Each structure stands twice: as C-alpha cells, then as structure tokens.
Image (cartoon, grey):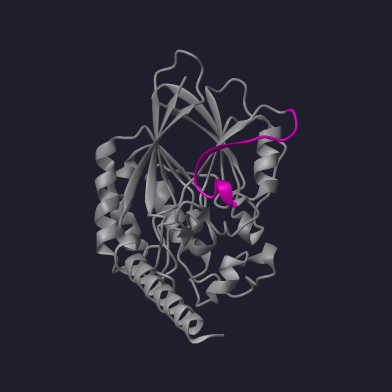
C-alpha cells in the first residue's frame, strides 16, 4: 500500500473510532434516560365504538437507584388510561420491588393485567454483548436457567393482584373495562419456555379478545392468530436496544424478525384474519448493559378504536 493509501486507512480508522466512542457516550449518558411516550391508534374495536385507552408498560428492569425512571413512570398516571397491560421484566435487582410499586403508584388502581419475564425471576448477570447481537440467550437459544430464581416475583405477584391487576401467566380471564367486556389469554415467559399454549379460541361474546406475552416468539403469535385473537401485546425485544439509524434493529433476542422489533404491526398465519400486534421497546436495560442507541426507552398509549 502506498503512503497515501495508508494515511486514508488510518484516517478512516480514526474517524470510525471517534464515531463509535461518541455513539457509546450518547447511548449511555443520554438516550438510555430519554424516556418517551409513544401514541398509537389501533382500529380493532367494532365499528362505531368509542375509543379505549390502553397503557402498555414493559421491561422496566428497575433498580432502587433509578429515581428518574421512577418519577417518569409515576407521571404516566396523568394519562388516565382505561387499562394497563404490563408485559414483564419489571426487576433488575433483588431490592427493586418497593421502587417498582412506588413507580407504578396510582396505575395499580387502574384495571390491569400482567405477565412475567425472565428478569422477574432471575437477577441479570454479565453477558457477552456479541452473543446478544447474534441471537440472545435463554433456553430456546441454548442458554441455561437452572440457577435459583432469586428475584421477589411472588411478592410482586401478590402486590399486583392485591391492587386488582390480573395475573395472566398461562391462564385466561375477563374484565369489564369502561363498560366493555374484554377477554384475555396469557402465557408465562416464552423466552424461558415457561409458556403453556392452550386451545382456547377468542371469546366471540367479548368486545375484544387480547393475547398477552412477555416475549413475542412465533409459536405464541401463530397460535393466537389461528385462534382468532385480534390484538396481541408483548415486550422483551427492547426494540433491538442498539439500532442502526435508517436501518433499525439488529436483533430481537427471539425468533421474531427485526422489522417488527417494536411498534404496531400485524401477524397472520395462512388465510386467518390478521392480528394486530404491538411490541414495546420497553423502558430499561439490563443493569450490566445500560445503553441504548437509536432506540429510546418507551411506554405506549394505545388508543383502540372502531
């Protein structure tokens, strides 16, 4: 290589290093705390129905010291949603439950449903970030969850249900919300292979039937679409967490395609009617990887309409 070529290569390496360092600094110092409320309209109710407001929360990954996140979450009560759907991974520390309950605050008095994710059962551990980018971990990806479940998930379940939220872990239930009859099916975390899929069709007598899962694995999405559930809510993906501007997510940490790593999309199997599917990019990260890039932490207010 000539001297000019070596200089160009050196300059390119320097600029790449500077850009990478700048992106990392932005992601760890700014974007990971840039909490954002998304607003989405879903035309899933019967024609002529008045709107129903659903607040979708996911992946808070709370630690006791995250005061800014807790304050932002408390402020969501001002939205006055009709229903709260929590798709799991609330905890990231064994002592975080009081902070979670304080952050959700008045939202626990709103009709709500919930399922758990792996970080409601197991405290996070340091991991190789490259492994995450090429497909994540978990039982389905050859990971191991044989260690003791050390997070206070049973106490959290009791606290949620005592305030009126409904546990949908591998079960079905019904709620009347703003005068509408809602039926739900839910699963425990598919990422851990805790899910039990039941052949329970969407209730035709309900005003809306909703499927709720932590991780949007295709086996769950396919099953519920075939059973006629018009709306499915999930989290887990963090929206990719580290995204490429103008391209999007590099991974979903499950078998969902990266084009649907976050936001509102449809899911359809064969000739079945499409289901609306909302995947939350979530509010947090593992405490060992507190960085986001081109993917702000979020909660979503879904306005369901006719």
Relative to 269, does residue 48 appear above or below in the rendering?
A: above
Residue 144 x %, y %? 65, 72
Front position in the image: 148 or 193: 193
Residue plotted at (69% across, 62% down): 140
The answer to whether residue 236 shows anywhere in this view is no
Residue 40 x %, y %? 41, 35
Residue plotted at (34% across, 35% down): 81
Q: Is residue 27 left or right of residue 193?
A: left
Magenta region includes residue 248: no
Q: Is residue 108 left or right of residue 167?
A: left
Residue 102 is drawn in which quadrant?
A: bottom left
Residue 225 is drawn in which quadrant?
A: top right
Front position in the image: 185 or 282: 282
Q: Which residues are magenta?
A: 258-271
Front position in the image: 26 or 74: 26
Residue plotted at (54% across, 50% down): 261
Front position in the image: 72 or 182: 72
Relative to 190, does residue 109 appear above or below in the rendering?
A: above
Magenta region includes residue 270: yes
Numbered label tally: 0
Q: Residue furthest top?
A: 48
Residue 7 x %, y %? 45, 82
Residue 8 x %, y %? 46, 78
The answer to whether residue 185 shows anywhere in this view is yes
Q: Quadrant of the N terminus?
A: bottom right
Residue 16 is drawn in which quadrant?
A: bottom left
Q: Is residue 19 left or right of residue 217?
A: left
């Amino acid at each position: 290589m000539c001297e000019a070529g070596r200089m160009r290569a050196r300059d390119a390496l320097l600029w790449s290093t500077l850009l990478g360092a700048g992106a990392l600094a932005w992601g760890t110092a700014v974007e990971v705390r840039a909490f954002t409320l998304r607003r989405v309209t879903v035309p899933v109710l019967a024609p002529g129905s008045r709107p129903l407001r659903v607040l979708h929360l996911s992946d808070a990954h709370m630690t006791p010291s995250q005061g800014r996140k807790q304050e932002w979450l408390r402020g969501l009560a001002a939205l006055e949603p009709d229903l709260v759907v929590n798709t799991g991974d609330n905890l990231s520390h064994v002592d975080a439950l009081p902070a979670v309950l304080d952050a959700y605050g008045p939202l626990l008095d709103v009709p709500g449903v919930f399922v758990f994710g792996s970080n409601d059962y197991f405290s996070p551990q340091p991991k190789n970030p490259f492994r995450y980018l090429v497909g994540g971990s978990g039982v389905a990806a050859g990971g191991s969850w044989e260690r003791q479940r050390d997070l206070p998930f049973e106490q959290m379940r009791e606290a949620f249900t005592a305030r009126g939220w409904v546990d949908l872990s591998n079960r079905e239930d019904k709620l009347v919300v703003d005068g509408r009859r809602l039926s739900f099916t839910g699963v425990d975390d598919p990422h851990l292979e805790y899910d039990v899929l039941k052949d329970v069709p969407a209730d035709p007598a309900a005003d809306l039937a909703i499927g709720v899962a932590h991780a949007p694995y295709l086996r769950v999405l396919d099953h519920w679409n075939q059973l006629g559930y018009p709306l499915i809510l999930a989290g887990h993906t963090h929206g990719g967490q580290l995204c490429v501007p103008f391209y999007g997510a590099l991974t979903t940490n499950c078998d969902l395609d990266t084009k649907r790593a976050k936001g509102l999309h449809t899911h359809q199997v064969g000739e079945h009617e499409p289901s609306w599917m909302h995947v939350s990019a979530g509010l947090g990260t593992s405490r060992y990887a507190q960085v986001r890039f081109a993917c702000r932490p979020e909660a979503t207010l879904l306005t369901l309409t006719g």
